[in-house]
Image: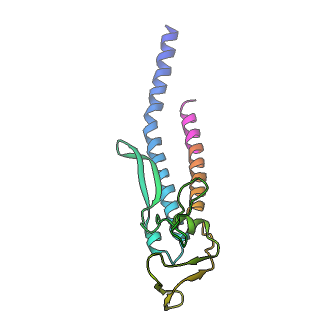
Amino acid sequence: MAKAADFARRLNFIGRQLEQLPALVVEANKAIRQIAVEAVAEAKALTPDTAESIRAGWTIVETGSIEGQSYRVKVVNTSPSASKILTDVYGHRYRKPGGQFFTVLDALDKGTTRHDIVPAKKNALAFFFKRMGAFFVGTYVDHPGQAPSNLVTLPKLHAAQKAKNLRRRLERKARRLFR
């Protein structure tokens, strides 16, 4: 009889602890969402002033949810400019070491070396150069290169560290529940 009472007491304890888990899950979801919001803000702050459309494209996409509670989110750039594939003067696409094509977002994030810019389909380039406040017309531009802004790399590293700390904190709380 003592064993049955002890078992019932233990079962009752586990039931009370399980009632606290939904609050822990809600707390985790809010924290995950906050990490993503901070990553978007950081990416926007790191995006160069010359790339307004890319700055506006940063957003949060929900990639997993259960009963309306998102448990997996992803920070992405939805701007068409960000995913534009870079080509050389002959129209050949630049590839990254993994085989994927090098995009404008990659160039802003990792920087570029000195390179020439030539028209792809026309005989001349023509655009308004904001920094100089003048209209440019020419057959090529000798571009000095772009310094890396780490607008993808840094927010990703910071979010990963925050997520790791969140996981540790939640694991400690969960362990305390079932001592």
Residue depicted at 44% across the width and 80% down the height: 122
Instruction: Examine the rendered structure and indicate whether residue 101 appears above or below residue 49.
Output: above
Residue shown at 60% from the left, 69% from the top:
149
* Camera sees residue 18: yes
User: Is most of the magenta stretch helix, strand or loop?
Assistant: helix
The x, y position of residue 142, in whole percent, is 60, 82
Residue 158 falls in image quadrant? bottom right
Depth order, front residue of 39/23:
39
Residue 175 forms part of the magenta stretch: yes
Quadrant holding the C terminus: top right
- Tally of numbered discs: 0
Q: Which residues are magenta?
A: 169-179
Farthest residue in the top direction? 1
Q: Image quadrant of residue 140?
A: bottom right
Q: Residue at x 45, y 42 (%)?
A: 25
121 or 113: nearer the eye?
Answer: 121
Is residue 176 a member of the stretch shown in magenta?
yes
